[in-house]
Amino acid sequence: MRITSRSLVGLAYIFCALFNTAHANTMTDRPMVARSLLMNLIRADGGSDARVITAQLALPNQQSSRDFLLSLQASWQNNQGRQSINVPLPVKNWGSGGGNSPWQFKDAQMQLYFKNLFSTAITGLRNQGYAFQLSKNDLFHGHIFSFEHDGFTDFGIVFHAKEYPNDADIVEQSGGKGADSSFSTADTNYKLRNLIWIASASKIWAIHANRPALTPLITVEWFDSNSSDPILQNLYRLQLKALTVQDGYFSDLGRALGSINFFSRETILQLTNQPSSNTTIQDTLYF
């Protein structure tokens, strides 16, 4: 059997999982950093950690913030107000949480609210001079979590834009995804690839994940940055380069509630190899 660099990386990830399981009771610092960031967003609009990219969004059906949170709790914790949706297999496989049964809100206004999260995020970033788009390699998914503060349950989404840059080493790690991307990690836009929505605030922030204070949110806890192991050093380098805020540190504060995916008509046609003249294909948002 030929041992490739990818095989070695895979072994390193297995070691990571085993180490994390054995030392789970010591893993507290990253979630604390995540909670501090969330409280900074809620109480101080992010300060130096983030920038606001959307104004406060109108809630669906003119709900109060309390009723909106209760609606979300019923949907994500009790499966109320949702309906199954058929998603083409290539699209589901590309999306986040592809193994789950996709669903959407029965309430059209609730569904539209979450669809608008993607479009208003793109508009907000572009208004600030940053080039982002809805595509199979850029902004198409987020990770939903719950957390407690000030005596109630709140909800958040960590969106990952610029998901698949065209850097050769990252393309290799992502199984070839991103080879056709028009952006790389060196682009000035890339540093704002992590977005956070908080339900009670009904707005989205772009996180300055390249700030040293937030480095714990893009790296794993088990790694010793002083390690002399070249494989582990390369893994650490790739984490810093990819600049992915780990949604698991946020879901550790409450519950992981799955993913949200949005695919434009153009992206669905591309993923399913459908002709552009196929007018039956529409934009799709699913959980």
Image (cartoon, rainbow, N blue to C red):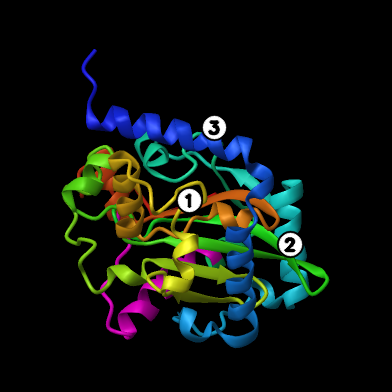
**Residue on which the image places disc 1:** 220
Q: Residues within 10 Å of mark 2 (few under 14, many from 20)?
A: some
In magenta, the rendered stretch is: 114-136
Magenta segment: does it hold 107? no
Looking at numbered disc 1 in the image, what kind of residue is underneath it?
Answer: Val
Mark pair 2, 3: CA separation: 38 Å
Looking at numbered disc 3 in the image, what kind of residue is underneath it?
Answer: Leu
Is tag 2's residue or tag 1's residue first in the polypeptide sequence?
2
**Residue on which the image places disc 2:** 71
Q: Residues within 10 Å of mark 3 (few under 14, many from 20)?
A: few
User: Mark 3 and mark 2 in contact (Cβ < 8 Å)?
Assistant: no
In this orientation, which residue lies closer to the viewer: 193 or 135?
193
Mark pair 2, 1: CA separation: 34 Å
Q: Name above or below for residue 144 compared with residue 100.
A: below
Magenta segment: does it hold 116? yes
**Residue on which the image places disc 3:** 18
Quarter of the figure with residue 71: bottom right
Quarter of the figure with residue 53: bottom left
Question: Position of 79 compared to 98: left or right?
Answer: right
Q: Residue furthest right?
A: 151
Q: Main secondary structure of the magenta part?
A: helix
